[in-house]
Amino acid sequence: MKNQPFYKRMGFALQGLDAAFRMESSFRLQCLAACAVLLVLAWSRPAMLWWALLLLNCGMVLAAELFNTALEHLIDHVHPSLHPSIKIAKDCAAGAVFILSISALCTFVAFLVEMVSN
């Protein structure tokens, strides 16, 4: 798979996004939240810094969810039985998504507070 043309690599990435969207309810929910953030940004037209902060947070949450999904599927394929170390790996990956989600939520709340105060 190394040194594939760009269009093929882009195809692999789009297939991954499609698979995550079809199979992961968390990813669908996070995509919906990102769309809601985009709508609020388009409606309120804040400073570009807010666009950058909020879109960066949305991207990080979605990317973390994709990493989490990839890790879970790989682990389940390689070692389908339960094991304490596997549980820790999956829980840590989910924890990373959770931390980024809380960070994104806090950034969005800060944005809303500033919008209301102006």
Image: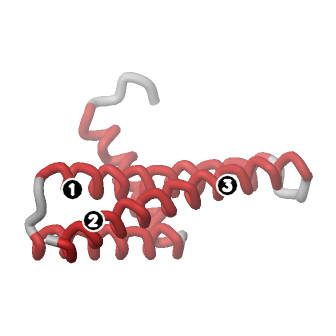
Q: Earlier in the sequence, mark 3 or mark 2?
A: 3
Locate the C terminus and report the quarter of the image it occupies.
bottom left
Is residue 77 shown above or below 105?
above
Q: Amino acid at mark 3?
A: Glu
Distance in Å between CA atoms under marks 3 and 2: 33 Å
Q: Residue at x 12, y 52 (%)?
A: 48
Q: Nearer the viewer, mark 1 or mark 3?
A: 1
Quadrant in which residue 114 is drawn: bottom left
Label 2 element class: helix
Res. 110 in view: yes
Q: What mark, if any, has residue 50 been given in the picture?
A: 1
47 vs 86, nearest the viewer: 47
Question: Do residues under tags 1 and 3 come within 8 Å of each other at their CB atoms?
Answer: no
Count of labels in the image: 3
Q: What mark, if any, has residue 35 been given in the picture?
A: none
Question: Which residue matches tag 2?
Answer: 111
Q: Amino acid at mark 2?
A: Phe
Distance in Å between CA atoms under marks 1 and 2: 7 Å
59 vs 17, nearest the viewer: 59
Extreme top residue here? 3
Q: Residue at x 56, y 56 (%)?
A: 99
Question: Do residues under tags 1 and 2 come within 8 Å of each other at their CB atoms?
Answer: yes
Q: What mark, if any, has residue 72 been given in the picture?
A: 3
Label 3 element class: helix
The percent coordinates of residue 55 (x first, y second) are: 27, 55
The percent coordinates of residue 42 (x first, y second) are: 11, 70
Pointer 1: residues within 10 angstroms few (<14), some, or many (20+)? some
Q: Earlier in the sequence, mark 1 or mark 2?
A: 1
The percent coordinates of residue 100 (x first, y second) are: 50, 55
Q: Residue at x 36, y 73 (%)?
A: 33
Pointer 2: residues within 10 angstroms few (<14), some, or many (20+)? some
Q: Residue at x 36, y 69 (%)?
A: 109
